[in-house]
Image (spheres, grey):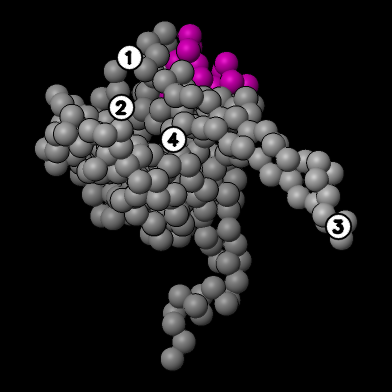
């Protein structure tokens, strides 16, 4: 008997990129070390007797730079990680012995696009706009479906359009649109496994406030055990008019880490 999943793949699957490319100088939160890559060996630096040559690079990056996923060790509140785990105890020795990034799950789940920018009939939400539970409800109504338990909810603000302009994208002075606590609780009530957005912090960054407080991270990571994806690019998905899809993700197993770079994909019938 042919496995239904194999049969579906054999029938033709289209993969849509949901992440940004990684490159030196790309936008990066001021809280994290930026991404750097350079060649350490170039073709011709060393040539083998048969004429062959190889090139390779060195990559330096923080775990929360570019398109990535937050592990449950990333945020604590009142000294505790998700499930009441002592953050101080868990981080002894320079790596996390609880909730480390090696425990991040691979995801092959139903994904739902909540296109809040489209709800407001704009290409990009205004700087500093707070996405509310009402916004998510309206986006779900527009999509004709909403995320359920164990699924993945992706929030489109349109902010990915600014990724090529680091100053605008990071919005230090102007703010960045994102989820408010009411939106986080809306997601938690539905029991999603993970949620993500097309901004640097997922949650609302008010004008001039920077990353002073991040209540949505507390609600999702600490209180609810919901993983957060940041720096997504949801433009191709929105342009294709796709609101539900198979979400595919395989984080790096970084032992004791607090996050991982990722390459998320939406799989749809070709």
Tell whether label 3 touches label 4 (CB within 8 Å).
no
Q: Main secondary structure of the magenta part?
A: loop
User: Residue 11, can we see it?
Assistant: yes
Of callouts 4 and 1, which one flags the residue occurring earlier in the amino acid sequence? 4
Question: For residue 209, which quarter of the picture?
Answer: top left
- Measuring 53% from the left and 25% from the top, which residue is drawn there? 34
**SS class, disc 2:** loop
Decide: is 97 above or below 26. below
Identify the residue position indicated by label 4 in the image: 63
Residue 212, label in figure: 1
Cα separation, mark 2 vs mark 1, equals: 14 Å
Relative height, residue 89 to residue 243 (above, below): above
Mark number displayed over residue 49: 3
Between marks 4 and 3 in the image, the one whose residue lies nearer the viewer: 3
Earlier along the polypeptide chain: callout 3 or callout 2? 3
Query: Mark 2 and mark 4: span between their CA atoms?
Result: 24 Å
**In this view, 145 is above or below 139:** below
Percent across and percent down for residue 194 are: 34, 46
Gap in angstroms between the C-alphas marked 4 and 1: 20 Å
In-front residue for pair 223/92: 92
Q: Earlier in the sequence, mark 2 or mark 4?
A: 4
Q: Is 169 inside the magenta-drawn segment?
A: yes
């Amino acid at each position: 008997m042919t496995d239904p999943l194999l049969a579906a793949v054999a029938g033709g699957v289209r993969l849509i990129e949901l992440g940004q490319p990684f490159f030196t100088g790309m936008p990066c939160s001021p809280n994290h070390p930026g991404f750097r890559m350079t060649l350490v060996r170039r073709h011709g630096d060393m040539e083998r007797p048969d004429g062959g040559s190889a090139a390779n690079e060195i990559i330096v990056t923080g775990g929360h730079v570019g398109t990535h996923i937050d592990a449950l060790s990333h945020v604590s509140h009142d000294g505790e990680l998700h499930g009441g785990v002592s953050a101080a105890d868990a981080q002894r020795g320079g790596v996390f012995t609880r909730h480390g990034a090696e425990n991040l799950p691979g995801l092959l789940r139903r994904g739902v696009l909540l296109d809040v920018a489209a709800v407001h009939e704009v290409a990009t939400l205004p700087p500093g706009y707070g996405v509310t539970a009402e916004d998510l409800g309206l986006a779900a109504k527009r999509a004709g479906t909403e995320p359920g338990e164990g699924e993945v909810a992706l929030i489109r603000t349109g902010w990915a359009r600014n990724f090529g302009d680091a100053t605008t994208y990071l919005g230090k002075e102007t703010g960045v649109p994102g989820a408010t606590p009411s939106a986080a609780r809306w997601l938690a009530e539905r029991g999603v496994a993970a949620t993500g957005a097309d901004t640097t912090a997922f949650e609302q960054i008010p004008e001039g406030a920077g990353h002073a407080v991040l209540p949505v991270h507390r609600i999702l990571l600490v209180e609810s055990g919901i993983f957060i994806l940041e720096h997504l690019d949801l433009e191709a998905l929105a342009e294709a008019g796709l609101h539900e899809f198979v979400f595919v993700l395989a984080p790096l197993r970084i032992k004791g880490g607090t996050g991982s770079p990722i390459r998320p994909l939406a799989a749809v019938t070709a």
